Structures are given as structure tokens and as C-alpha cells.
Image: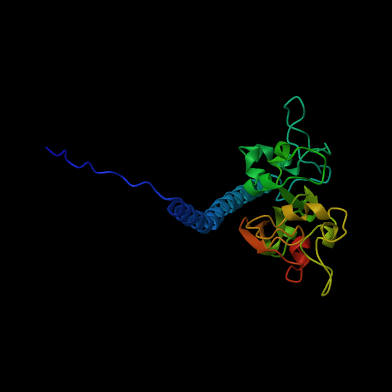
Amino acid sequence: MERPTQGFRRAFTLIELLVVIAIMAVLVSVMMPCLWRAKEAVRQTVCQSNLRNLGIAMTMYAQDNNYRLANSDNTNGFFWYDNSKRLRSTSDRDAYWGVAYAGYIKNPDVCGCPSFRTVSELIYPVEPRLIWQAAFGLNGNASNKRLTKIRDAGHFIIAHDHVEPRLEQGSLDMFHNDGPGTLNLQMYRGNGSRAKFYFGIFRHSARSGDPQRTNGKANILWLDDHVSALAETTGDDVPAKWYTGQ
């Protein structure tokens, strides 16, 4: 009596396995950029939402203080709290300028940017993780500014993505330049003293490995509380009046 023939499963050959691995590698290479773009889009959205909420808090402060923004001339650091976990004073040079609005901000995280966490080094020798809640540079011209002195609230910068807490040196650390043929952010370009930190400014959707050219964007908070993204620029498309309000 013959036994029934049992079915058997043929093993993959080495070539077939290599083909499968190659197909999987192709799929991963196609999907990874899409996943990266989706993740970065989320980070940028969170950053813009934080800036918008920060703007609302600053407007509320101004309305309660004779339509004047807080005096942030003394604060030029990244820290909200001292070693005893107490909120730093606006007279503390190591304090982040956001401390002046602490009474209107529910959580310091509103001054954070998810993409700021990818910045490996900062202009001051501190651990990046310690200052995730200090991701935006304040326009120094906004300090103690009376809102009624601004001609066009929709074109006056309050703060934007930066690695520096307060911006006050014109084309050296701001987005405008000094005229055709010149560059903005001069301290952060070429042989500038802070050139290695440039990548942390136009940090959203950065697609270049060149530390001096990210092909990315920076989020900006305007006085009327709207937020927009500025594509990496050398400054020709950014008038100085966006910072001065004049």
C-alpha cells in the first residue's frame, strides 16, 4: 500500500532572499523621506502654535500694562528658574526674556520648539536639553515698546526661531541685511564668530548637510499675533522696518 504523498514547502534560495531584501530596501528608501517630512511638519506646526500662544500672552500683558510690552533689556539668557527652582527675575541677566510674561503663560513649554531640540550646540556653553523652553529670539526693539508706536502691527517682528535669546545687533544677528550685495546674520556666516550655530536658525525642514545652507525655514511671531514661516534668506527680502517698526 502506498503512503500518501505529503506536501512540502520549498525553501527560499539565496537569490530569492536577496531579491526580497533589495525590494524591502527600496521601499524603506522611498518611505523614509515621506516619514521625515511628516514628522517635521508636525514639529513646525507645534512650534507655530507655541509662538501664537506666546503672542497672545504678550498682548494680554501689554493690555494690562498701558499697552506696553515688558522691559527685557536685562534678560539675555536661556533660563526660567534658578537652582532652587524659583522663577528668575527680569533683572537677572541669565534669565530668559519670557520670564516677564510668566503670569500670562501657563507653561514655559510655550517658548519651546521641537526642532530646537535637534540643535547639538548653542552659543553659550550649556546643555541644550536644559534650555528647550527658550527657543525663540526676542526682537530687542520690542522690549518696553508701546504698541501704539508701531505703525503696522502685522509687519513688526516680536520674536522668531533663533539660537540667540535677544536680537539687538542689526544685520549681525537679524534677518535683514544692510543693502544689496550684503548678508544678514553676519555673525553666523562664513568666518563669523558664531558660524557653527547657523544651522539652528533656519531649522525647520532643513534639507542640506551644508552648515551654512539649510534650505530650511524659520517661524516668525508678529505683533498682531499671526505666525508665518520665512524661507532661508540672505536678507534682501527682509526690510529693517520689520524690526524697528518705523
Q: Nearer the viewer, residue 153 or 206?
A: 206
Tally of numbered tags: 0
Where residue 10 appears, as percent x and y from the top left, is 33, 47
Rendered residue at 61%/37% (across/down): 106
Q: What residue occupies the far top of the structure in this picture?
A: 84
Residue 129 or 24: which is nearer the viewer? 24
Percent x, y of residue 7: 24, 44
Q: Pick the quarter of the image with the C terminus.
A: bottom right
Q: Residue at x 58, y 53 (%)?
A: 40
- Tell me if I can see residue 238 in this picture: yes
Q: Say whether residue 61 is visible.
A: no
Q: Quadrant of the N terminus?
A: top left
Task: Residue 128: give x, y in percent of width and height.
Answer: 73, 40
Q: Nearer the viewer, residue 67 or 154?
A: 154
Q: Does 196 sit above or below residue 184?
A: above
Q: Which residue in the rendered view is the most extreme toward the bottom?
A: 180
Residue 229 lies in quadrant: bottom right
Q: Is residue 172 left or right of residue 205?
A: right
Q: Is residue 112 above or below residue 154?
A: above
The residue lying at 78 percent from left, 62 percent from top is: 244
Q: Residue furthest left?
A: 1
Q: Is residue 111 left or right of residue 125?
A: left
* Residue 22 image offset from top left, x and y in percent: 49, 56
Residue at 79% across, 55% down: 141
